[in-house]
Amino acid sequence: MLFKLLRGKHRTVVTIYLILAVLFIIPSLVSPVFRSYENISNILNQTASLGIVSMGQTFIVLLSGLDLSVGSVISLTTVLCATSMGNDPLTIFLAVLLCLGVGAGIGSLNGILVSKVKLSPLIATLGMMALIQGVALQIRPYPGGYVPRSFAETVTGNLYHVPVPAILLVLVLIGTIIILRKTVLGNYIYATGGNEENARLAGVNIDKVKIFSYTICGLIAAVAGLVLTGRIRSGDPLVGTAFPLDSITAVIVGGTPFAGGQGGVEGTLAGALIIAMLSNMLNLLNVSSFYQYIVKGLILITAVVIYSLREK
Amino acid sequence: MTKLKSIGEKVKYEAFLEGKKVGDVIQRLGVYFALFILLIISAILSPPSVSPTHLLNVSRQASALGIVGIGQTLVIMTQGIDLSVAANLTLIQIMTAGMILGREQMVIPVVIFCLGVGAFIGLINGLGVTKLKLSPFVMTLCMMSVLTGVYLLYSGGSPRGRIPASLRFVGAGRIGGVFPAATVVWIVAIAASFIVLRYSIFGRYTYATGGSPQASYLSGVNVDLVIIIAYVISGFCSALAGILLAGYIGTGSLTVGMGYDLNSIAAVIMGGTTFAGGRGGVIGTVGGALVITILFSLLTMLGIPHSGRLMAQGLIIIAIVSLYAKRK
């Protein structure tokens, strides 16, 4: 059964979830702290924002692009929330709408720059990253501001003993799976990522596909920013700095190759969980956080080498 | 050998023909045009910012970015990218300060050792890209992460060290009290890389490999070796910039490399070298590094806060690159 799965169509996803299971089961057997309810919900809380933004990033990597501006979008979202939210539920609702709109707007700008102006995704989103970072720092040069208790507690609380961030993570996962697997647009995304010229000749409107994907990525980054705002309970203009490269790492560890065209968000979730679980283990083992950079680099290279060996 | 030379000649001839096209001239000179406009705006908004003293100072500031940009140019010309330059630079900067510890007699051995470490980091990148066939982005992203861990561990989070007078002079001093020594190092690096790209077999192979790896391979070019050398040079350049910055700051710093990875890429692309490879050169990158540095310096002189500078930087990168993006 397992062998069949390991050779079948979904072998990459099966492999990555097997690795995830091993990484979860072995320390759980050894350490009661690791398998405690508190620690597991802690891991889920920590993974939530990275996992969510990585799913948006998956859309872009599938198109053999990349989005470096997601971190700035996250920072801007926390800043906007902490600046515009009041205790009144209506202002909270409007602030959330504002953040989602801004995220989607930035994403669609990226998409237009990449498709219509024909900039390389790296340069377009790099410019956007600097621009939006500047806007976030302009609004709030230092971390601070006010995030109402009700918003923070809703976003970071529990629903029937399940952490809300984890529920949001699963909702985004389901939403993105539906888009990628069940809609025509999803097919177009895979087709464009696989071979852009062929997709164009087959009648796919590549520009539209790209603009849509970047818009989704920006929107999802804003959702991640909202979750993070609830966790840090303030607006921090630099909180998102590590997200662009971390999310790309999660996508690639999750089995979507950098060249695009195959893979998907299911693997990305496992990629993000693996990164978060390893950090958590190193923390529990009291290993200096400095080692985590090295470990992250090694996970990424190991994953890529394994995938490239399997391709042969 | 004659066969290989003739490929080089052909590539050169084609480059010459392409150079005739107006679009390509714009692409090649566009960044200097932008630089010229930027200087005029500077002169209007803040006259002291175009004084020779200030411009020499700007050239000193730009030297580290410019040197990193040279290596980045070579890598991008082979259809690659090097994200590890900033972490490499930071590691070398901290190591230089931490190993010399103010001892004058240690300067030369440590500098040689650090340049070697930088080149070795580049060698690993090159081997990963060619032999393991990893995408350059992923390989150098891993390297960046690992090097960040290494310099944090090496410094324990608080870098120390002191740089003796001779190396401080190279980083911050002025020859004859006027001309910054770091700028001289940059000019030497520009001249060397320009000559190598224009007149050496390696240079022609770099253009050929970037233009079409397959065709170059079939013509007998050792494509892997060309790519590896490009990454080694990039690692070496980052180390050189790290040493200059160690001399300038005088002690180790964890944040010294911030922005060098993406700014060096921006300088290269603004200078007309394309991600598609096989085109461009170091002269454009020099312009790109100057545009980025002068822009920041002008905005600082105008008293615009960091946030405004970032916004302007983002807009200008997008604007300049958009100018020739459609010409393809």
Image (tube, coloured by chain):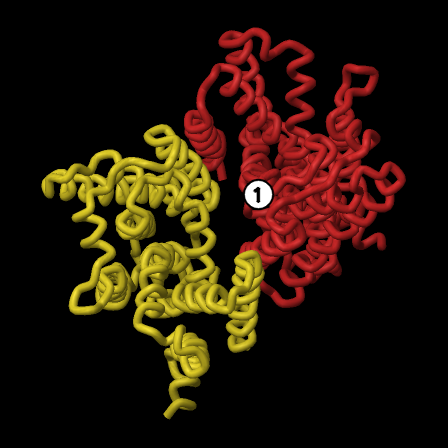
Q: Nearer the viewer, residue A103 or A238?
A: A238
Label 1 chain ID = B
Residue B285 point in image, percent of width and height: 63, 34
Q: Residues within 10 Å of mark 1 (few under 14, many from 20)?
A: many
Residue linked to disc 1:
B261
Position of A250 with respect to B76 (left or right) is left
In the picture as drawn, the residue positioned furthest to the right comes out as B105
- Does B171 sit left or right of A133 as displayed? right
Residue at 57% across / 15% down in the picture? B39
User: Which residue is more in the foreground, B112 or A112?
Assistant: B112
Left or right: residue B214 versus residue A274 is right
> Colour in which chain B is shown?
red
Question: Vertical placement of A294 versus A89: above or below?
Answer: below
The image shows residue B100, relative to residue A277, as above or below, that is above
Q: Relative to residue B103, is residue A279 depicted above or below? A: below
* Rendered-image quadrant of the N terminus of chain B: bottom right
Q: Chain A, which colour?
A: yellow
- Could you tell me which residue is drawn at 47 percent across and 45 percent down? A122
- Residue at (42% x, 25% y) in the render: B308
Q: Quadrant of residue B253?
A: top right
Q: Is residue B310 above or below residue A218?
A: above
- Describe the element under mark 1 as helix, strand or loop: helix
Percent position of residue A127, x then y: 44, 37
Tell me where residue B66 appears, x and y as whole percent: 66, 33
Q: Residue at x 47, y 69 (%)?
A: A281
**Whether residue A218 is visible:** no
